[in-house]
Amino acid sequence: MERMRTHIGIVGAGPSGLLLSHLLHLQGIESIVIENRSREYCENRIRAGVLEHGTAELLVECGVGERMKREGLVHEGIYLRYRRQDHHIHFPELTGGKSIMVYSQHELVRDLIAARLRDGGQIVFDVDAVALHGLESNSPRISFQKDGKPFEIACDFIAGCDGFHGISRPSIPAGVLRTYEESYPFGWLGILAQVAPSSTELVYSNHDRGFALLSMRSPEVSRLYLQCDPEEDLNEWPDDRIWSELRQRLSTEGGWKLKEGPITQKGVTGMRSFLVDPMQFGRLYLLGDAAHIVPPTGAKGLNLAVADVRVFSAALDAFYKKGSRDLLARYSKICLQRVWKVQRFSWWMTSMLHKSNQGEFFEQIHLAELDYVTSSRAAATALAENYVGLPFEPL
Ligand SMILES: Cc1cc2nc3c(=O)[nH]c(=O)nc-3n(C[C@H](O)[C@H](O)[C@H](O)COP(=O)(O)OP(=O)(O)OC[C@H]3O[C@@H](n4cnc5c(N)ncnc54)[C@H](O)[C@@H]3O)c2cc1C
């Protein structure tokens, strides 16, 4: 068994694990990241693409925002499309100048991996048999295998950044965490297409046939989604059927045209709202998707992960520099305040925009909600300030 020692053992090289490791490095705190996938897999996993105002600012402040500033697309609003008409929500006007940044999650992951390796950081890819030990002791341990050989990392704290399906959360004894969960009777069929986006900004469309979203990852790549059954069989969706359905659900009275191109990736994602309280047990702290999942309609998952990292890295800074445990003790409470507000917003956007199985009464309620949001400055402001990101919690 090869033994290692560090301050913080980090499980998972997604956005939360990598950003945490980077911020800790800037604070002079050592960490080792272990990841059960390959570097190539992590750098090419297509996921989120919308960064809140505060997320983009934080990335610039900590020195990993250079490429994002160059290649990312600043968006000043979104379109809500319903009854085949567009209504624009202008963020800067409603939020005192804030906007969002469209920049692919896998590009951010590439930037973070490059920054860690440039700074001599340790990321161990392709590990397996990961297990956590001694969580209630002052020196918890992470055991794993790499190339068939056993390793163990002893550390002061473990950061569980291993996503919804990771091992960190299930390592906490039964009965400690309270789980809140809501699943939805629909999912998203998402495609990536090699074609310039048909709109300069995201279009959220409420349609009789179901919700559709037009999004983008770059000036050459479109990302589009269709509401579908959570168990939808992709084999029943040849490219022609996907484009035909998108054309119908995104059509407008003004004869707007959808640009079509080769589909390079297809997938179905289920939707759930999920969180655990507290986000911590002994010396194990959960961050990002390991602790909470939101339906993607509000574009919040990655941003919530970044918000957790901000709190946890500040808490560790206070612990190592001043010996203070105050922020560590309040970690869960501070994060969960934001998580619940973001859960509410994501649930609200999801309910308003999707066709539910609740019947015609609710379809009319959702249209009334859209009419209200697009005609009342107060309601539009509420949407805008959540979409660009609520202010970070004071620490
Ligand atoms: C299709 C889709 C679209 C999305 N769109 C958006 C969007 O527009 N905006 C937004 O903000 N969010 C979006 N999200 C959510 C966002 O992608 C996640 O919230 C984000 O990835 C969370 O980051 P994380 O680091 O916490 O978890 P993850 O990105 O899941 O990273 C966890 C890492 O841990 C690794 N791991 C797992 N188990 C182990 C183990 N046992 N040992 C070691 N490593 C392990 C995984 O391989 C992974 O690399 C979307 C998600 C999906 C699936």
Image: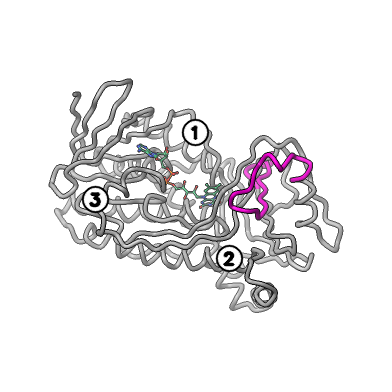
Residue numbers of the magenta segment = 216-242
Quadrant in which the N terminus appears: top left
Of marks 2 and 3, the one in the foreground = 2
> Real-space Cα distance between discs 2 and 3?
34 Å
> Real-space Cα distance between discs 1 and 2?
29 Å
Place of residue 247 in the rendered image (x, y in percent of width and height, measured from the top left): 79, 52
Residue behind label 1 places its C-beta within 8 angstroms of ligand 1: no
Q: Which residue is mark 2?
A: 349
What mark, if any, has residue 43 been given in the picture? Answer: 1
Q: What secondary structure is marked by label 2? A: helix
Residue behind label 2 places its C-beta within 8 angstroms of ligand 1: no
Image marks 2 and 3: residues in contact by CB distance under 8 Å: no
Report whether 389 appears left or right of 237.
left
Residue at 65% from the left image edge and 66% from the top image edge:
89
Q: Does 373 appear above or below 188?
A: below
Q: Which residue is mark 3?
A: 316
Report whether 42 appears left or right of 23.
right
Q: Residues within 10 Å of mark 2 (few under 14, many from 20)?
A: some
Q: Residues within 10 Å of mark 3 (few under 14, many from 20)?
A: many
